Amino acid sequence: MSPGGGFSPEMMESRITFVELDAATSNLELRSSPFKKTASNLSGNHGISSTNDVHELLECPVCMNLMYPPIHQCPSGHTLCSSCKARVHNCCPTCRQELGNIRCLALEKVAESLELPCRYQILGCHDIFPYYGKLKHEKNCKHRPFNCPYAGAECSVTGDIPFLVMHLKDGHKVDMHDGSTFNHRYVKSNPQDIENATWMLTVFNCFGRQFCLHFEAFQLGMAPVYMAFLRFMGDEDDAKQFSYSLEVGGNGRKLIWQGVPRSIRDSHRKVRDSQDGLIIQRSLALFFSGGNGNKQELKLKVAGRIWREN
């Protein structure tokens, strides 16, 4: 969730130290992960040039997140962020005066002199950034938590890879397999019902890493298709160290796909919409199933292999 998320009492309770306040800006994003810690563990000197008082001045009184330009103020000088200005219907949450369009240029200037730690400091990022460069870094910080890769339903859980592996196993009951080769059979009694059909995610453990095999049906333009693809549980740079192949066939025909697994930084929807995987038109899938195109049961066997590139 972006730093402009909704008001949370949980954030108000964590206002203890300077660095703690910064950690609170990531509280909503990390609340479902194992990294949610009290910021008392974060206190200390981190090379930050601002004082606690200045830091508190930069905290929006509505969402409790740090404010970035444009910073708005009411005629009495009370400030709030631009996201919350619309939410409070142009009424100051402190004194109830009309906000108008007054910018707090002095506070924006003060912010330029600050240096702050990354919000993912507790996850291993120890770099310090200028106030206005902090957000840009955090969007791509390699220490930021991963989203749950489960595709069968929306899941807001985040965490590191070991935590998500256990979450998939215990929370979503996904199939876990060891090895770099596999054969999976996908069956659907009514292949005409293709909208939003998603099969159970399968996770493979090999080369000391984890890979997610997805298989689902959707409309590609006007054509109903099935698609299989692999996602890597890690960052994109690590994913590029591996390749995989998928194979499906029947009735003396065979369709083969080879590619690089996508990182789970990319959502399964993004990968699907980019068509980066094995795509099988429904008529061909039914032909592979042993029918003549009118068969009412889908039976596809997808074989695959994962290997590490030298």
Image (tube, helix red, strand yellow):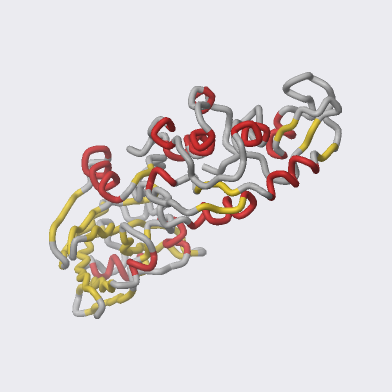
Quadrant of the image occupied by residue 39: top left
> Is 252 placed above or below 284 here?
below
**Residue 161 place in picture, x, y as percent:** 29, 51
Residue located 39% across and 54% down the image? 194
Residue located 54% across and 24% down the image? 12
Q: Residue furthest left?
A: 178
Instruction: Please indicate, yes or no, whether residue 44 appears anywhere in the rendered image.
Output: yes
Quadrant assignment for the C terminus: bottom left
Residue located 43% across and 50% down the image? 144
Quadrant of the image occupied by residue 154: top left
Front-lying residue, 114 or 179: 114
Front-lying residue, 77 or 34: 77
**Residue 190 place in picture, x, y as percent:** 30, 52
> Is 228 placed above or below 158 here?
below
> Is 64 placed above or below 145 here?
above
Front-lying residue, 201 or 20: 20
Q: Is residue 190 left or right of residue 3?
A: left
Instruction: Please indicate, yes or no, whether residue 280 appears anywhere in the rendered image.
Output: no
Front-lying residue, 8 or 156: 8
Residue located 50% across and 63% down the image? 222
**Residue 5 place in picture, x, y as percent:** 57, 36
**Residue 20 place in picture, x, y as percent:** 49, 34
Report how many numbered discs are placed on residues in the image.
Answer: 0
Q: Is residue 217 left or right of residue 127?
A: left
